[in-house]
Amino acid sequence: MTDAPAIPAGERLGFSFLYFAPHLGPEHHRWFGRLAHHGYALAELPVVEATDAELDALRTAAEAEGLGTSAVGFAVAGANPISPDRNERRAAVEHLARLAEKTARLGGALLAGPIHSAYGLWTEEPPTEDERQRCIEVLQAAGERAKGYGVTLAVEPLNRFESYFLNTATDCDALVRAVDHPHVVAALDTHHAHIEEGDLVGAIQAHAGTLGHVQLSENHRGTPGRGQLAFPRVLEALDAIQYRGWLVVEAFSRQSPAFGSALRIWRELDDGPESVLAAGAKLTAPRG
Ligand SMILES: [Mn+2]
């Protein structure tokens, strides 16, 4: 736990570009200016499919608007951290190291996402202790590689419909403690937590020593503040554990139709990007 003074939540507010697409191009650069306009300090950018040239262009565009960057990525089939195949686990370390390198190329210091197990891969069984041990070893090695890039890896639990391996804050906290590497921390996404946790405040308390990244996302993943998430309670609970990291608004859409379908978003959830940006910025605005 840090004794650093609290930076106001509004100055730690970010927006995830996954709202627009999983693979960003020049057509997305204009949104950095809109983030800055709405008061965001950070752009969280998907890096899995990004080329170095695209990362350089994104960094330039973000910096021109005075925005910091973080990255979002995930583990993939063929490089699954929990695979029984040793070569595949080596590939997982390389994949995560490459994501950390891409994060640094963006000028960022944090990569968040489901990096614990390959996204979309199922055994049709609950997680095993062997899988957990493999994950710990891969994240230890990946954390050491990330450290070389000045990047911290934030491990994000997903809800049961997207991952069988890591669903809850308690399990994530225990995993990160077992990894025991200064460049590996826990992440909390309120969308997943809303599904999996009995009590969101309790989940945040369970993270007190390991939480290094937060994504603010509605139960329906649409416009934040227009769903069932009690964001004021979440922010209060984060203050209470002296969380000092980023607060990244994560909403999804059909802006990229294929990505929307992959996320099972079958209807319009919002009134467009400007409305979502404004609603997200309101989450941390002083009340009263
Ligand atoms: Mn998330």
Image (spheres, helix red, strand yellow):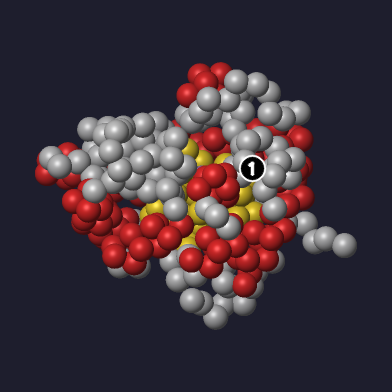
- Answer with the quarter of the image where residue 53 lies: top left
Residue lying at the far left in this picture: please name it.
86
Q: Residues within 10 Å of mark 1 (few under 14, many from 20)?
A: many
141 relative position to 4: left or right: left
| Residue 209: x %, y % from top left | 45, 71
Residue 108 x %, y %:
47, 52
User: The disc labelled 1 sits on which kind of residue?
Assistant: Glu
Judge whether 199 appears above or below 259 on screen. below
Residues 97 and 113: in front is: 113
Q: Is residue 181 left or right of residue 86?
A: right
Viewer can see residue 276 = yes
* Count of residue discs: 1
* Residue 193 position within the rendered picture, expressed as x and y whole percent measured from the top left: 53, 50
Query: Which residue is found at the position 62% from the left and 72% from the top?
Result: 240
Closer to us: 184 or 221: 221
Name the residue that disc number 1 marks: 218
Compared across the picture, whether 279 is left or right of 135 comes to right
Residue that lies at the very extreme toward the bottom in this rendered image: 3
Please name whichever residue, 253 or 219, is drawn nearer the observer in this view of the structure: 219
* 146 up-or-down from 125: above or below: below
Q: Quadrant of residue 94?
A: top left
Query: In the structure shown, which secondary structural element does the residue marked by tag 1 occupy?
Result: loop
Asked if 181 appears above or below 164 in the picture, the reply is below
The quadrant of the rendering that contains the C terminus is: bottom right
Quadrant housing residue 183: bottom left
Residue at the outermost right position:
288
* Residue 93 in view, yes or no: no
Mark 1, ligand 1, within 8 Å: the answer is: no
**Residue that appears at 18% across and 51% down:** 130
For image coordinates 61% across by 44% down, the residue present is 217
Taking the image as shown, residue 244 lies to the left or right of residue 76, namely right
User: Residue at left 50%, top 48%?
Assistant: 196
